Image (spheres, rainbow, N blue to C red):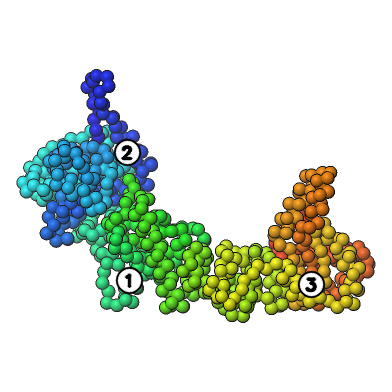
């Protein structure tokens, strides 16, 4: 709204920037504001800041003596406040200069006539807006803005009328005080035809409630039908009210959380940081959410809704709660739709994280039933926290559920029956050995899930009498019983054929006895061993001559897989007695294929081919035998 200086000027003289207001409004609508609906928030914010300044001028006035009145009848939208108002000098300074804010402190000597406002503005934290561009948002829905204002700083101040148009022009004129009998400001918009979605009476009322439900000043809405004005914010924030009992307070906060977020909270955590004037609640989600998925939180600044998607208010690990807070000292960005990342926000984030830790600690100590429901839904979130937080680790590690050879149980319960706890490095490794390890009396925990292996290894910090070790094939096979000498000799020819058939998979074959007897074979093969064999194989194929021979020799030392046949299984006892070489090889391949399938690890193409081929060969053998 600043006019260009078109007069001729000598070379090197200062010139004034030219501003294309329509281009600027387009920039705001597409890159600063998320939606045209923010025009009403900006008008409400300006009204609230004017009321704040009015209370600075008249500190003895009751808190509810001044308010805000909205009117919308479909043909116009009007926002009227009882705030400090504007003088003619204020209008020229603040309404006609883009980026100039009455809420920012100034040391400009030219501002001396409005020193009272400037002195108030030095208390920056009293105001929501700081950037001087909010009124421009009205051009998102209207081509003309009409402002009628009267200053409260001078008893006989005249009224001032300002009309700003979308082409960048404006007019100012002084009117008699009777044009506005009381101090304050009225902003009137005549909506464009394409802005009906945001300026219809019902929508204006809904937007006012959406943005201003927690404002501390009374706000009313009139739709022009002649009925009584409806209160936009009939009740203060629930955490500021008094309740007859703690139970009544807890139920009221939970009901508010359900109204805001649409779910019944598992529990509500009150948040109170007096240093920054922050109050609110955190609602614990009743169901699990994917790890790392962050929910947006509702953040109000001085009662005005700033954002419904403010992820930055809490740390990443706190994805089991959604918050609604109202703060005094957090800084909004220029769009007032997110928070400015500064030291204050970082301190608030840390303090709120501490409140969540305190809730977990208190729940663990006083409400085991609630703790159980919380961990059932959010154990992964707690595990991620326990990895980096020693206090949470000490409190909750014994309570956290893990997949073990005793089923899904807590580490505390598992450690009572297993002084030595073995932990696998992958899910597939656990599935390979779980049944056999359980039958052998070994206590094994599935360490393949996120955080689990690291946490299990920290169990001795909580239970010093318990030892933890990684499970390796040697540990497991050491607990399998050898067969007697006579049985071993009788099966020697079959085992030799089986080893030859499975040599392509770098797999050895052994005969043992173990439970359950229903398991014909166990394939012991770690992911690391497979990777090492694959790496060695590729290196050998890529190198020839002497290097190929050397790598081939080293490959002999690479860890091999082991197919352990169960002598207690009837199928195995039948297989080892086979004296037909080709049938013996096929049966060994079939046993390997079944064990690989039971391990639930991804099959290599060669293994898939072997399973199909061995099945067809056995079927063909059976058909030949029957014919």
Give the number of the mark in front: 3 or 2. 3
Which quarter of the figure has residue 424?
bottom right
Q: Which residue is mark 3?
A: 520
Q: Quadrant of the C terminus?
A: bottom right
Q: How many angstroms separate mark 3 from mark 2 (CA)?
A: 76 Å
Horizontal side of residue 613 vs 352, given as left or right: right
Q: Residues within 10 Å of mark 2 (few under 14, many from 20)?
A: some
What is the total number of numbered labels drawn onto the structure image? 3
> In front: 592, or 483?
483
- Identify the residue at horizontal 26%, vertical 28% (top origin): 16
Which residue appears at 68% of the width and 65% of the height? Answer: 429
Q: Position of residue 540 (x, y in %)?
A: 79, 48
Residue 408's image quarter?
bottom right
Q: Which mark is residue 252?
A: 1
219 shown above or below 509 = above
Q: Disc 1 on helix, strand or loop?
A: helix
**Residue at image x 49%, y 58%?**
293
Foreground residue among 390 and 326: 390
Residue beneath disc 2? 25
Q: Position of residue 166 (x, y in %)?
A: 27, 36
Q: With 589 as the anchor, is 345 left or right in this view?
A: left
Between discs 1 and 2, the one toward the N terminus: 2
- Label 1, label 3: how many angstroms apart (C-alpha)? 61 Å
Q: Secondary structure at mark 2?
A: helix
């Amino acid at each position: 709204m600043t006019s260009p200086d078109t007069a001729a000027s000598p070379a090197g003289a200062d010139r004034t920037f030219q501003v294309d207001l329509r281009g600027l409004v387009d920039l705001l609508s597409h890159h600063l504001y998320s939606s045209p609906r923010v025009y009403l928030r900006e008008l409400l914010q300006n009204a609230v800041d004017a009321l704040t300044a009015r209370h600075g001028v008249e500190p003895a006035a009751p808190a509810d003596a001044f308010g805000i009145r909205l009117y919308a009848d479909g043909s116009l939208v009007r926002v009227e406040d009882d705030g400090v108002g504007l003088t003619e000098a204020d209008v020229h300074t603040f309404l006609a200069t883009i980026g100039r804010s009455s809420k920012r402190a100034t040391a400009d000597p030219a501002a001396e006539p409005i020193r009272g406002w400037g002195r108030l503005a030095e208390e920056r934290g009293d105001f929501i807006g700081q950037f001087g561009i909010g009124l421009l948002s009205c051009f998102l829905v209207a081509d003309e803005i009409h402002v009628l204002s009267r200053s409260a700083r001078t008893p006989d101040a005249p009224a001032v009328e300002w009309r700003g148009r979308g082409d960048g022009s404006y007019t100012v004129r002084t009117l008699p005080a009777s044009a506005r009998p009381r101090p304050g400001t009225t902003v009137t918009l005549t909506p464009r035809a394409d802005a009906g979605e945001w300026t219809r009476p019902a929508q204006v009322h809904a937007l006012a409630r959406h943005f201003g439900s927690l404002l501390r000043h009374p706000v009313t809405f009139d739709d022009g039908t002649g009925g009584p004005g409806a209160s936009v914010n009939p009740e203060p924030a629930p955490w500021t009210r008094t309740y007859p009992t703690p139970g009544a307070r807890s139920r009221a906060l939970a009901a508010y959380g359900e109204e805001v977020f649409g779910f019944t909270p598992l529990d509500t955590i009150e948040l109170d940081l007096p240093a920054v004037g922050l109050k609110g609640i955190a609602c614990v989600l009743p169901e699990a959410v994917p790890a790392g998925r962050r929910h947006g939180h509702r953040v109000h600044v001085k009662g005005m809704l700033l954002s419904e998607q403010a992820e930055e208010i809490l740390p990443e690990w706190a994805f089991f709660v959604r918050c609604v807070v109202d703060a005094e000292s957090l800084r909004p960005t220029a769009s007032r739709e997110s928070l400015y990342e500064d030291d204050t926000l970082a301190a608030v984030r840390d303090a709120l994280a501490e409140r969540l830790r305190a809730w977990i600690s208190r729940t663990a100590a006083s409400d085991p039933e609630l703790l159980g429901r919380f961990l059932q839904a959010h154990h992964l979130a707690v595990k991620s926290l326990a990895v980096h937080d020693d206090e949470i680790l000490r409190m909750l590690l014994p309570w956290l559920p893990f997949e073990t050879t005793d089923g899904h149980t807590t580490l505390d319960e598992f450690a009572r029956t297993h002084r030595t706890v073995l932990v696998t490095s992958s899910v597939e490794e656990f599935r390979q050995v779980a049944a056999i390890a359980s039958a052998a009396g070994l206590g094994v925990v599935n360490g393949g899930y996120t955080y689990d292996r690291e946490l299990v290894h920290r169990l001795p910090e909580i239970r010093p009498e318990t030892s933890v070790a990684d499970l390796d094939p040697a540990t497991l096979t050491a607990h399998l019983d050898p067969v007697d000498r006579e049985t071993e000799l009788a099966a020697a020819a079959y085992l030799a054929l089986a080893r030859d058939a499975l040599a392509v998979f770098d797999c050895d074959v052994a005969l043992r006895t173990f439970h359950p007897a229903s398991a014909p074979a166990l394939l012991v093969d770690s992911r690391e061993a497979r990777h090492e064999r694959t790496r060695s194989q590729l290196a050998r194929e890529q190198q020839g001559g002497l290097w190929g021979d050397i790598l081939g020799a080293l490959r002999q030392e690479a860890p091999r897989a082991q197919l352990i046949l169960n002598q207690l299984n009837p199928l195995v006892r039948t297989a080892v007695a086979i004296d037909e070489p080709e049938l013996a090889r096929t049966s060994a391949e079939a046993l390997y294929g079944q064990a690989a399938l039971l391990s639930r690890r991804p099959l290599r193409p060669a293994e898939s081919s072997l399973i199909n081929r061995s099945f067809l060969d056995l079927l063909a053998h059976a058909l030949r035998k029957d014919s």
